[in-house]
Image: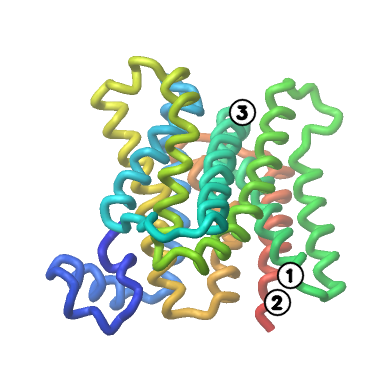
Amino acid sequence: MTDFALDDPFDRRQALPRPGRLLRQAADSIPPSSLVLLSIVSVQLGAAFAKELFSVLPPSAVVFLRIAAGGLIMAAVARPKLKGLAWRDWAVGVGFGLTLALMNLSYYEALSRLPMGVAVAIEFLGPLGVAVAASRRRLDLAWIGLAGLGVALLAPWGQQASASWWIGIGFALVAGACWAGYILLSAAAGGRFPGTTGLSFAMIVSALVIAPVGVTTGGADLLQPSLLLIGLGVGLLSSVIPYSLELHALRRMPKHVFGILMSLEPAVAAMAGVLVLGEVLHVQQWAAIVCVVAASLGSTRMNGR
């Protein structure tokens, strides 16, 4: 993660190295809404490039490359301080890391079987569920119903779909549940670890958990310089860059506006799948994605008010 995103207090601006000050000043000149949109595009481009690696590496090995690359970079610039942590802090940090590992593994397994837009739309049920659970408005049940309709449209009812498609839907649902847990544990870690060191700690735990599976399935191919370079790029695009942009944007915009912009993620994922991977979606699948995006937008706007 870049310097400007990790030094949270603005009163230490002059203490930053010159490159860090320049990056922070550059970010300050960009509207926060643009930073969020850039973050979404970065995540989905990273996912598209990761999916291209599935032809030479299994999803578990690609997940390991992504998390290991992101974890190493974040640990270098936001090294977590383990001394003096209580056992509850360790429990939250380890749980955060395990959830992060399972979320990424499930999502990549879903990506290997489903188009990007479909996988992200199903996975988006996780954060939508957290938003609705935190609200007491009855209208939010309508948004859940709309999102459920979208997922129902994505299921291949009455079609001769392969078992792989249904397995992909199952993995996407698991990823969504983990995303909900990630949101809750991220908030808990934020109260126990300073700055972004909680996320750094969780990514290190996640890399250690994924390593046995990733190394076993990837084997000697993981040592190819070209694949390592692509894995580094995926880690930057999918983790380091978006986390930096989102943290900086959240300092300058209301959280409900941030949530509204993030609701566009399934649509951006579908566009990335079309433009980068050539994944052509049917009208029914686009309608399903629109339902999920509309449900997320509606829920976020109501909760923001």
* Number of other residues with Cα within 10 Å of mark 1, as a class: few under 14, some 14 to 19, many 20 or more: few
Mark 3 residue type = Arg
294 or 184: nearer the viewer: 184
Q: Quadrant of the N terminus?
A: bottom left
Q: Earlier in the sequence, mark 3 or mark 1?
A: 3
Per the rendering, the mark at residue 113 is: 3
Per the rendering, the mark at residue 134 is: 1
Q: Quadrant of the C terminus?
A: bottom right
Q: Which is closer to the viewer, label 2 or label 3?
A: 2
Q: Which is closer to the viewer, label 3 or label 1?
A: 1
* Number of other residues with Cα within 10 Å of mark 2, as a class: few under 14, some 14 to 19, many 20 or more: some
Quadrant of the rendered image containing residue 68: top left
**28 sits left or right of 113 in the view:** left
244 or 95: nearer the viewer: 95
Q: CA distance from mark 3 to mark 1?
A: 32 Å
Q: Which residue is mark 2?
A: 303
Task: Indicate the secondary structure of the residue bearing disc 2.
Answer: helix
Mark 1 residue type = Ala
- Residue 72, position as x, y percentages in the image: 31, 44
Q: Earlier in the sequence, mark 1 or mark 2?
A: 1
Mark 2 residue type = Asn
**174 sits left or right of 232 in the view:** right
